[in-house]
Amino acid sequence: MTNHDIFNFKDYDIIDKSYTPVNTDEEWTHTKIFGLLFTASWCPPCKLFEESLAVFYHDINSKLDTGGKGFEIIHVASEKTKADFKESIQKLDWVFLRYDDKLIHMIAEELNVECIPALYIFSDKGKLLSSDGRKDITTLSTKDIWETWIKLYWNLHPNEIA
């Protein structure tokens, strides 16, 4: 990643699967770790990865006692049309950057996304924790993934309680 390693996700145009804007100040009060997910419905490896990620997403959020979601996924979809985008997000339980958000290409370029699926892990302060979340999800247990990400979080934010 370049020297711009801070992303303020609350400034983005985030929507849910009903295409309703998400009130990030309200919804993300307890969220400490974010996954920025790059996929497309026309990509077979992406579909398989989304299934594994969904298991982790539901598992970790059901186990955390945070009063809300401790982990949130912001999906950056590379769909061919807006109709494809709207159809693909119906199957997923996380949130999304709008299909026509002008930031999509800038973010992908800034992160140097070369292939999909890709999952970048960030702290709630916008600091990059891992550029290889995909590997973590496909090779580690839920407990090991969360412990790894929390250790990275504490290393970047030593005065925070996660």
Image (cartoon, rainbow, N blue to C red):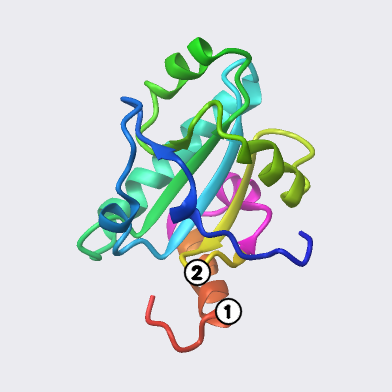
In the rendered image, which quarter is residue 142 located in?
A: bottom left
- Viewer-proximal residue, 136 or 120? 120
Label 2 vs label 1: CA separation? 10 Å
Residue 109 x/y as whole percent: 76, 44
Identity of the residue drawn at 34% across and 52% down: 24
Residue 55 x/y as whole percent: 40, 40
Q: Is residue 46 left or right of residue 98?
A: right
Of badges 2 and 1, the one in the foreground is: 2
Identity of the residue drawn at 47% across and 53% down: 11
The secondary structure type at the circle numbered 2 is loop
Q: Residues within 10 Å of mark 1 (few under 14, many from 20)?
A: some
Q: CB under 8 Å between callouts 2 and 1?
A: yes
Residue range of the region highlighted in magenta in the rendering? 129-143
Identity of the residue drawn at 45% across and 61% down: 33
Q: Principal SS element in the magenta part?
A: helix
Residue for badge 1 = 156
Which circle marks residue 147 in the picture? Answer: none
Residue 154 x/y as whole percent: 51, 80
In the rendered image, which quarter is residue 95 located in?
A: top left
Identity of the residue drawn at 57% across and 73% down: 152
Residue for badge 2 = 125
- Magenta span contains residue 138: yes
- Viewer-proximal residue, 37 or 56? 37
Q: Residue furthest bottom?
A: 159
The secondary structure type at the circle numbered 1 is helix
Residue 7 x/y as whole percent: 58, 59
Q: Is residue 71 left or right of residue 1?
A: left
Point out the image quarter for the N terminus: bottom right
